[in-house]
Image: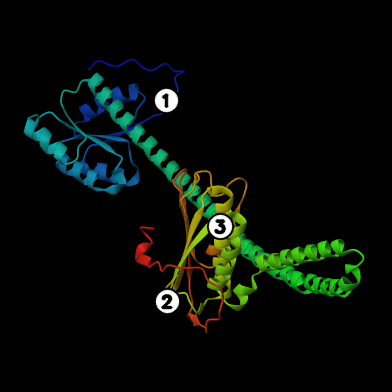
Amino acid sequence: MSQLPIQPSGTARTRHTVLIVDDDAATVGLLAEVLETEDFEVWKAFTAKEARAMLAERQPELVLLDVKLPDEDGRDLCHWIKSDPRFDQLFVILISGLEVGVQSRVSGLNLGADEYLTKPIQPLELIARLRSFLRIREAAEALRKANELLEERVLDRTEELRLANGQLQRAAEELRTLTSRLLETQERERRRLAHELHDEAGQALTVLKFSFDNIEEVAQSLAPEPVADGRAALTRLTQLIRNLWQELRPAMLEDFGLIPALVWYFDRFTPSTRVRVDFQHENVDGRRFDRAVETAAYRTVQECLTNVARHAGVPEVRVVIWAGPDLLQVQIIDQGCGFDTSGGLSRNGSCGLVGMQERVRQLNGTWSVNTRPGAGTRIIAEFPLAEPKVTQPKSFSTLDTQILRPSDFAAA
């Protein structure tokens, strides 16, 4: 065999380990000389028993295994190596100078050998094949480490996301709590202001009215016109304050319930905005709901109608209310200009829709808006109900209403 050139002494390279298993000492010596010249670390075994003992103590990277051994068929040893998980990264090359036929090669490869070479072995071919196997091994090792690193990063990232998600959930819960308190405070402040307007301002206006009554006879002959102007101004102020405290917290809502309060509101909404309300309801007459549900439903309709009057540009809006045993549904539909929801629900700097949505969700309800530019708007709010309350209806002024059944909603 011709020897290969030795690598320059200054070149740093990893010494790879090769186990030669062959009962021919001359062949073992020759292969060892060639491999050591190429800077391989060579281990030697002359029987299958020696090879098994050596593999039990340490593991090489490559095994050159003769097919014919004195104590065991080399192919059986190859099968044993390939069947043991400890050697799953070990490359085995079977070598034979006698069994060189196709069937022998196929038999060896079927038993797990990575290659099957025949003697005499060409040094260049042997080294090339060993280098090829080592490149495969290094690539597999690099891939394994990359997978481990990727798994570590995935686990780290998953943990980061879990922590971030936990923080987000806590922040969302805190925001819901804050929003709930804000809405409660808002309603409480409205009630307080309505109380003060009704009691204190109302009493002051009553005193002024009595004062005008007392001085009217005396002032008729002296300055009748200023007195009449003052009385007219007092009347307007009285009506204004009455409307303010009713808007802040309608007494109709407290005393009579949702439907009478909405009818009262619509009676005042249309003259001031010139937008007619087509009000349709089913299964709500004579029913009282939870105070928070009635308030949320009333405020939802109020906010929606305010938006319609400001932005929709329509002469009419439709309000539909339907109640089942455990659900109250409110729909507000207009055929106006609509709007683009891709940028969020805030419109013209207003957060009314966002606040409305949050008010509904605070009661474990659902809220949706269906709209697009030029195609109108439909807002649906649904509130879960507790056991329905039935009260004796009290008389109140009503609008002409048409019953709209749930099956008609989709076509509305």
Residue 194 found in image quarter:
bottom right
- Answer yes or no: do the residues labelled 3 and 1 have beta carbons within 8 Å? no
Q: Position of residue 90 (x, y in %)?
A: 29, 39
Residue 325, which numbered label?
2
From the viewer's perspective, is the residue at label 2 or at label 1 nearer? Answer: 2
First-in-chain label (2 vs 1): 1
Q: Which colour scheme is used?
A: rainbow
Q: Is residue 6 left or right of residue 272?
A: left
User: In the image, which disc is placed on residue 305?
Assistant: 3
Q: Which of 106 and 27 is in front in this view?
A: 106
Mark in the foreground, 3 or 1: 3
Name the front one of labels 3 and 2.
Answer: 3
Q: Is residue 278 positioned above or below 294 on the image?
A: above
Q: What residue type is labelled 2?
A: Pro
Residue 354 visible in the displayed image: no
- Left or right of 226 in this view: 309: left
Q: In which quarter of the image is residue 394?
A: bottom right
User: Do tag 3 and tag 2 residues touch (Cβ < 8 Å)?
Assistant: no
